[in-house]
Every structure is written in structure tokens, then in C-alpha cells.
Image (cartoon, rainbow, N blue to C red):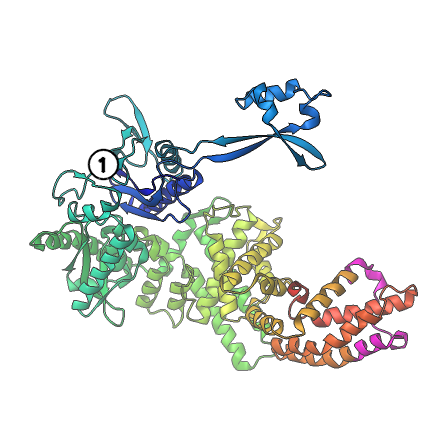
Amino acid sequence: MTDPKNLLVELFVEELPPKALKKLGEAFAQGLFAALKAQQLAADGARVTAYASPRRLAVHVTDVAARAADRPLSQKLMPVAVALDAQGQPTPALLKKLAALGADASAVPHLQRRPDGKAEALFLDTTVPGATLAEGLQAALDEALARLPIPKLMQYQLADGWTSVHFVRPAHRLVALHGADVVRVQALGLTADRVTQGHRFEAKAETIPLRDADTYAEQLREEGAVIASFDKRRAEIRRQLDAAAAKEGLKPIDDDALLDEVTALVERPNVLLARFDKAFLEVPQECLILTMKANQKYFPLVDSAGKLTERFLIVSNIRPDDPSAVVGGNERVVRPRLADAKFFFDQDRRKTLASRVPGLDRVVYHGKLGSQGERARRVQAIGHAIVNQLRLATVPYTVDAKDEFEVLDSKVREAALLAKADLLTDMVGEFPELQGVMGGYYARHEGLRDGVAIAIEDHYKPRFAGDALPRNHTGTVLALADKLETLVGLFGIGQLPSGDKDPYALRRHALGVIRILVEKNLPLALDELITGAQAAFGDTLAEASVSGPLLAFFDDRLANLLREQGYSAQEVDAVLALKGRRLGEVPKRLAAVRAFAALPEAAALAAANKRVGNILRKSDTADVPPTVEPQRLVEPAEQALAAALAEVRPRADRAIEGGDYAGSLQALAALKGPVDAFFDGVMVNAEDVDLRANRLALLAQLHAAMNRVADLSRLAA
């Protein structure tokens, strides 16, 4: 590697899509860096820095060579027996191969013989000249641009009026500097030089000649009024937001997605305080917050209790001496938005949710699954089935408990019928993100009985990873019913997720069901829930095979979730291998497996368990009696194992029945010695058929006792 210097490449374009900017900047930098490394132009310790602003994508790479080092290349040609004839002369096949590689017969004396498997082959050893930076950067630039995750390509014409170019936005300048030297590469009809541009309105000059690769960020900041780094610009916005809010004794809404989008919209952030009329605070704050964030990219301010105030923050892209015109303009713009929200809220409350329910029959849910009205009735039926399953899980129950279940069933039926009615309101029509939330507000406005309004609001929860779960029993049942209806219905008609495509968010729905069952420790079996949900579809899914594929889908989601939570693949496999369908028990079983794995006896017992499982799998099930005959236990080691099992198994079973899974597994530690002695001193596959059958029966009992909490064989190395 010769003459290493730092490299800067910048593509100056028209305003890039804000929601894609961060990914575009990272992809451009990493793509260019990877291509330079692959050509050995960037040193092993080279560092890459990405820059991305509304009008530029740039990358800075340290320690880039002007020319890569030459490298040896060894190319296998063919077996010696094929390459040379009996007299050792090159065959036509060898000469043809050499010609294809740009060599001729003069290279034959220099070919190397080397072992290749059982025979010898000829190899051509050459030296490949290292790429020049101009050549390598051109290839790297072409590759990086071709691989950008561009949401939608534009087609535009170059200055000659007839050459068309396809890119995310029209490009106007290209910079490529190796130290202080320009690298003459081309892209998108542009030839690289050292000139860029700064802020559209506040730069000191229209153009900025860059001195070298290392002064890029500094010159843009000082001469161009631009913070080129996405991360530094984001941090500056966050700092200004917090400082401006603190002056008011308030705090800005925490929204990373909004902060990323605003960072992609401004080059020189300037946070300003603005206000709206307090009368708008009569509207639910979710509506006001959403309209300010989604439509205007403002940061609403809330008090210490999380209640919205009439103040909000603007992130301006300019810094005038007198910001009053900017503030006033934004206050005038937001007023009609908030007025619309107030109008929608007032109009919606003139009709009850119940009066909107018939209209759901005219709203298509899915072409094969009917209307939203049909969907609501299915959710109602599934919710009723879930309440019945809960009732059965608590039998025997008291009279008070029976009454409690009847009240719960009544609330679930009412909430399920009304939960989708807010889809027909003006507010949800304008802001679909508020479905459920607005239903809860309208239900409270109507004075619906306690718990129903909360259930309507919560039935979409959890909406995303880390979201809160439903707050009451009615909402919990309704959320389960709603998600199961979606999953069973779409699986039933074959609308399964594929790769990255999940248009109906079925993975999110499945994780929601899992979180509710696990975190609320509900005594519900997943397979029974699916069966009950499918029954609600009647003839629509009567012939569909739903349970198997959907259970496998849940298993996959649950395994991924548990691994993300820090459990090892072995721990997760051990617990999930039993296919237990009461997911509320999974955390206790995982904790028990982790505690068991820490015991000194664990590794040996896991290995023995695996060995027992293999023996039983290779045996004909008909050869394994259901019970052990004590009189056929002739070897001391098998007698000792039977005695130990007779002592340990009842203790382990009692622990399981009491919910002490860790205690159950720890009780098994006493079996290590007898199990080791059994395999050391007893031949399982004895010639005597009766002895063999009795020993298999003993191993079957041992296997059953050891695998009630988890499949311990999955812990074996």
C-alpha cells in the first residue's frame, strides 16, 4: 500500500426523502468503505465516517492508499495427467486454458505442480497489479450507488438535454478528495472536483472549495452553516429541545422517529418556542399531539404529569435575528390543524358508538373474510370462548367467582361489539393511528359501564415492542380475541408472512398474544385458544388447516423473543421442545432450567438423558412395557436406579404440582450416581427378551421423570 491519505467523497443532491436519509447515509458510507477494503485500498485499521444532510451524502475514510499493493495469484489449471502428454508436452487442453488466461506455451516451464486431492495439478502463479485509487474508487462508487436502499427512483435529464439518469433525487455536484488531491471519478453524469455548497440561505458564499478531505465537516459548519453529520445534528436538536423545554419547566414529547425525521429536514437546526390557544386542550391530547407531530413536525410540550400544554417547539432551518416571524407563521399554520381536530371530536360525539355498529357491515375487512361487522361478531364469539376457558381453568369456583365470570363475559361481549365502531368516526378517518384510543374517549363520554371504555381503548395493545399490556380483565380478553381473530382468519385463507413481507403485521399480533399470556400468567392453553377462535369462523374456515401452521408460527416467534431476552438457545430449546401450550409457565420453566444447568450434576444428567432418549427411539414401542417388574431387576445397578427413582420421582412430581419447577429439577440431581452406575454396569439390550423389556421400561420411567419441566437432553453439549 502506497502513500495512505484520508479520502472524502460527497454527492450533493436536491432534498432527499427525510424518512430514508439516515439509511441512505449509512448505506452509502458502508458500501463505499467495503468496496475499498475489498480492493485493499483501505488499510486494515481504516475508519469510516458517514455524513448525511437533506442535500448531501458523504463519507470520510482514513488511511486510503493511492495504489493498492500487488498481490500474488495462484490459479489451478487442471490435473497433470490431463495437462501433459506422455512425453511431458502440453496438451491442447492446457494451451487452450492458458490462452483463456492471457498466457501461452512460454508459461509452461514456469507452471507449478502441487498435490490436489489424490492427484497432482498444475497451477499458474502470477502477480496481480494493485488497483489505482482512481480505478478502485470508481468501481466502489458505482457499486455503492447501485446498492443504495432507494425508496423510489427518479428519472431526470442532464444539462445536455437528452441523457437520462436514474437516482433518488437529481444530483448536482460530486466531490472526491484524497488528502488535498482531487480524484477524477464520475457518477450520475458528474465529474468529481473539490467544490460543494452549504446552506441554501445562510452559507457565506454560494460555493465552498474544500481544502482537503479532513476539513470537510469544519468548512461546512463555518462557511456553509451546515452540520454535516446526521448524528451530531440530531444530538444538537435534542440538546436545544431539552434546553428550551427546561426554560418553561416542561419536557418535549419523546419520539425517536420524529427526531430522526426532523434531523433529516434541517441542516442548521434552531429550536423556537410557540403557543396555541388553550381552548384546544379540550380535545383529547392524543389528537393534538398526533396532528402536531404528523402534519407539522412539531415537538409538543407536556408537564411533569405527562399532560399536554399549549406550548410546543419548532425546529427551524434558519436563524434570523428576530425569530418572531417564524414563530408567528408556525402558530398560524397549526391553528387550522387543531381546529380540524376539535371539529372532528365535537362532531363524532353527536353519535353513539352503538349507532355506528350497523355501518360496520358496509366496511370491507377482507374479501375472503367479510366485513368489519362480521369481524366484530367473531371477536365477540372468541372473547366468549376465552372467558369460558378461564372459567374452566378455575373450577371449582365459588358463587362470587361464578358471578364475576358472568359479569366479565357481559363486558367482553359489549366491548367487542363496540370496539371497531370508531373506525367510522371522522377523527379516526383523519388519523387511523388513533383507532381504539378514540373509541375509549367516546365510550367514556357516553358513560359506558366501568371497564368497557378502557377495554375498547386497550384492545389493540400491545401495539409495538415494549408497549403496555391491556389494563383490565375485559381489555385483556378482548385484546386476545382480536389478535387471535386476525391470526386465525388470515392463516386460514393462506395469507402468511413471507420473508420481510408481513402486510397484516401477523408477527406483531403473535408477539402480542405471547406477551399477554406470558406476562399476565394466564391459565390458557394456546392450542385451545386457536381451536376456539377457528370455531368462530364457522363454515368460512371449516376446511382450513390452521392449528398446526399457526402453532409452529407461535413457537418460532416465542423462541426468537426468549433469545432476545437473553436466554441461550439450549435453554429455549429445552423448554419449548415439550410443546407446552400454557405459555404463562414458560418463564418459570426457563428459570428452573437455568438453575439446574448450574448444578455440578447437570452435564452428566443431560448427557444421560440424551442417551436414554436415543435408546428408546431405537426401540419398538411395543417392546417397552408400561410398568417395571421388580423381580426382573437382577443387576445391583438397575435395582439401585429403580430404588432411587422411586424415592426421587414423587418429590419431583410434588414440586411440579406446587409450581416449583426449579425444585423439581434440583431433586433429579440425586439420580446422577445411580444413572452413571446403571450405564456402567448394565447391558440394556440384553439377549433375554424379558430382561431387555424390563430395562427399557425402567429407562422410559426415568425419561418421563426427567423431562416433565423441560427436555434436558437439549442441554447436552
Q: Name the magenta segment's main secondary structure.
A: helix
Total numbered labels placed on residues in the image: 1
Q: Position of residue 191 (x, y in %)?
A: 27, 30
Q: Which quadrant of the structure image shows residue 81?
A: top right
Can residue 130 be seen at all in this image of the molecule?
yes
Q: What element carries label 1?
A: loop
| Residue 169 forms part of the magenta stretch | no
Question: How packed is label 1: few (under 14 Cα within 10 Å), some, or many (20 or more)?
Answer: many
> What stretch of residues is rendered in magenta?
616-643
Q: Residue at x 73, y 67 (%)?
A: 608
Q: Quadrant of residue 683?
A: bottom right
Q: Is residue 602 left or right of residue 452?
A: right
Name of the residue lying farthest toward the front: 109
Q: Nearer the viewer, residue 436 or 444?
A: 436
Q: In which quarter of the image is the N terminus?
A: top left
Q: Which of 241 and 682 is in front in this view?
A: 682
- Residue 659 spot, x, y in % from top left: 60, 77
- The picture places residue 241, in percent across and down from the top left corner, at 21, 61
Residue displayed at 26% across by 36% down: 181
Seen in the image, is 650 located left or right of residue 365?
A: right
| Viewer-nearest residue: 55 or 345 | 55
**Depth check: 444 or 90 in front?**
90
Amino acid identity at mark 1: Arg
Query: In what quadrant of the picture does the C terminus appear?
Result: bottom right
Give the left or right position of residue 330, taking residue 533 as reference.
left
Residue, disc 1: 194
Question: Is residue 16 in view?
Answer: no
Q: Position of residue 178 (x, y in %)?
A: 29, 39
Relative to 217, does residue 529 appear above or below in the rendering? below
